[in-house]
Image (cartoon, coloured by chain):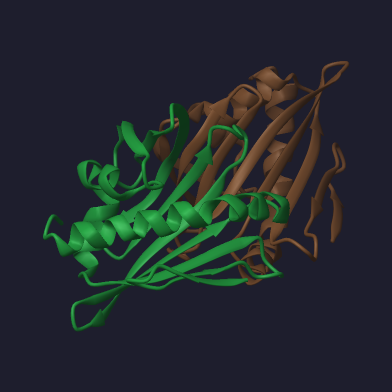
Chain colours: A green, B brown
Amino acid sequence: MTTTTNSDGTTTIDAPTDLPVIRMSREFAASPAQLFRAHTEAELFVRWMGMEGSTLKMDHWDARTGGSWRYVGELGGDEYGFHGCFHTVREDRIVWTFTFEGIPDGVCLETFTFEDLGDGRTLLRADSTYESFEARDGMLSSMETGVTDSYASLDRLLAGGEI
Amino acid sequence: MTTTTNSDGTTTIDAPTDLPVIRMSREFAASPAQLFRAHTEAELFVRWMGMEGSTLKMDHWDARTGGSWRYVGELGGDEYGFHGCFHTVREDRIVWTFTFEGIPDGVCLETFTFEDLGDGRTLLRADSTYESFEARDGMLSSMETGVTDSYASLDRLLAGGEI
């Protein structure tokens, strides 16, 4: 499956048939260092992650190799918790575990990389590996709006010079 | 692939063709609580993990949800580092990330469960999810001796009343 979304940028979402992974990629008008800050500084992260109309409360955030994190999203009065640990945090690469607490024993491994394309543009890749195709496909059906909204918010923060 | 090893117990190692995972299972003459201790207490862990003739030095070990770990194995004068973070640590389930530092950007997600079989026996399951079949198959070719030796050592610690 390949989906093209967002009128400002293009988010590509691939879910191959032979691996239980989701591969997302998107260009931003930003440097790798700006995207790294957007993904590691709590006060920035809460401003772009999540569906439009949602708010995100940081419960715990220790963005270093060996650290851990938890946040709670709120949308229309409902709260959704998420947590994990940071396996790797370095300027060109973040690897973390990710659990949506509505499925407490579900967990995936996510890798984010920031590739400098020159001309002030950077390619973000976000690859998620699931333990089964069922788990992958369940996430896939619910994630697209959140991803699209989140990256549009990140675009706005970058355009506004706030990162 | 299914491999049966160890004259005392039986370690089953499955590597299915449709998922990049390795699934191990083995019974122990132990309670779930004893296997949990063997997997979380550093001073016990270093006594059973690793190939025969190797020694394991704990560099960092914080076995709690959101903690992290690193150890170095030594065999015949060569040292091998391993590290990761603990996504979940609870009595019936441990989920961690695992990197062999010889392949620095390689990482897998491992889940350990301890199922009480009654009569003083517990089934350990260790499932590892890799990002690709290539990564899975590379690990598979080198792990069997280490697994067999490690679990035989754990048997001896249990039989000796040391856990």
Question: In the displayed structure, does residue B149 sit left or right of residue A79?
Answer: right
Number of marks drawn? 0
- Quadrant of the rendered structure where residue A101 is? top right
Q: Is residue A92 above or below residue B64?
A: below
Q: What percent of the width, then of the height, locates residue A86? A: 39, 45
When the figure is inspected, residue B160 is found, relative to residue A103, above or below; the finding is above
Q: Nearer the viewer, residue A85 or B23?
A: A85
Q: Give the residue displayed 50% in from the left and 37% down from the top.
A: B87
Can you say whether A7 is above or below A140 in the image?
below
Q: Residue at x 58, y 32 (%)?
A: A102
Q: Quick check: B59 left or right of A12?
A: left
Q: Is there any visible trace of residue B7 in the rendered image?
A: yes
- Would residue B112 be found to the left or right of residue A145 on screen? right
Q: Quadrant of the C terminus of chain A?
A: bottom left
Nearer the observer, A99 or A76: A76
The image shows residue B81, relative to residue A72, as above or below, that is below
Among the 4 quarters of the image, the one containing residue A61: top left
Q: Can you give x and y, in whole percent of width and height, for residue A64 in the image?
A: 29, 46
Q: Residue furthest left?
A: A161
In which quadrant will I find the N terminus of chain A?
A: bottom right
Please name the residue shown 41% across and 38% down the image.
B68
Q: Residue at x 77, y 26 (%)?
A: B115
- Residue B107 in percent (x, y) is at 51, 57
User: Residue B80: in sight, yes or no?
Assistant: no
Residue B19 place in picture, x, y as percent? 73, 61
